[in-house]
Amino acid sequence: MDIGFIGLGNMGLPMARRLIEAGHRLVVFDTRSEVSGKLVALGATAATSPKDVADQVETVMASLPSLQASLEVATGANGVIEGSRAKRFIDLSTVGSAMAVRIHGLLAKRNIVQIDCPVSGGVGGAEKGTLAVMVSGPKTEFDLLKPVLDVIGKVFFIGEKPGSAQTMKLANNFLSATAIVATSEAVVMGVKAGLDPAVMIDVINAGSGMNTASRDKFPRAVLPRSFDFGFATGLMLKDVRLALDEMKQLGLSMEVADAVGRSWETVIAAEGAESDFTAAIKPIEKKAGV
Ligand code: NAD
């Protein structure tokens, strides 16, 4: 299939590479033109704007870092909406259901179908093609796109209602965000009492406390103190805030979610939006004096 791909960052680049390797013809665009070059070397065509992508292909995917970027790329003056060939816009970014519905409505006026397609599983999952891929949109579109999406991971149809895959993704990321700060607090408690953090993680992973932070993030990026797992703290806080917004819109008040939100606000104030999310342990260590 001819596919446009916009946003070639930590997630977009490996997903786009897998699509090329699977035999799809890609037209790519990123505001950082140097990253497009990496895919041109593999046979992709570089475009000059989202509109230019959508002038060349019917199917456009995007993996972008903010709600504003998705809105602009999809519906801005030089956006996909202005492209002469675009039929569908598949947003792999995490934007929350309200923004997804807004983009859906704007694109529908130009007969472009918006398909929510947030993913989970990190950079490693994007490289290996093992992401959890959550899709909402017309079932006919899902059936058409399923063989393409199979290349990037395990594909789930969440429903036809616009934004519903975003709600699914936020539920997932709320748990992932909780695992990181909760595991950091558990480990810091042990270190304060004189325990070895590496032994603690081994025990937790053999016991009932095992979670995605103890299993993946601590061994790879926290214990070696490399803090380079590949997901920015700013993006994690974006997702936590979106989950809190989602709960509010549904009239829900959740105690753990509120506490997790406060923890991530503390992390971003201490470490900055560009830090890796595994740095969440640092302000907890500092406060504990370890
Ligand atoms: P990233 O910041 O590494 O990549 C975003 C890319 O988009 C960058 O290359 C940037 O130059 C480009 N970009 C920004 N604005 C643009 C615009 N207007 N036009 C074209 N390109 C533009 O972010 P990421 O980590 O790859 O995350 C992308 C999305 O995937 C986010 O919504 C994130 O929440 C989600 N996500 C990330 C991970 C992860 O582990 N990194 C996992 C699952 C989902």
Image (cartoon, grey):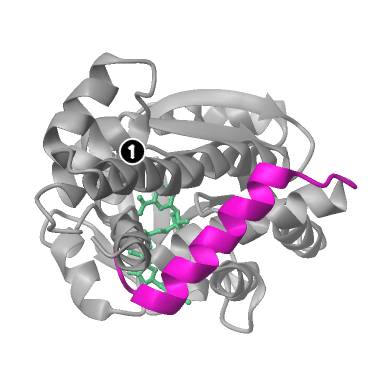
Left or right, 30 with respect to 199, comes to right
| Rendered residue at 40%/64% (across/down) | 233
**At which x and y percent is residue 279?**
29, 61
The residue lying furthest to the front in this view is 193
Q: Is residue 71 above or below residue 4?
A: below
The stretch in magenta equals 251-277
Q: Is residue 119 covered in magenta?
A: no
The residue lying furthest to the right in this view is 251
Specify the quadrant of the image occupied by residue 82. bottom right
Q: Name the residue under label 1.
A: 213
222 or 18, nearer to the observer: 222
127 or 140, nearer to the observer: 127
Task: Report whether residue 5 is seen.
Answer: yes
Q: Is residue 264 covered in magenta?
A: yes
**At which x and y percent is residue 224?**
9, 50
| Rendered residue at 34%/61% (across/down) | 288
Specify the quadrant of the image occupied by residue 194. top left
216 or 259, nearer to the observer: 259
Q: Is residue 271 above or below residue 226?
A: below
User: What's the amino acid at mark 1?
Assistant: Ala
Left or right, 64 with respect to 251, comes to left
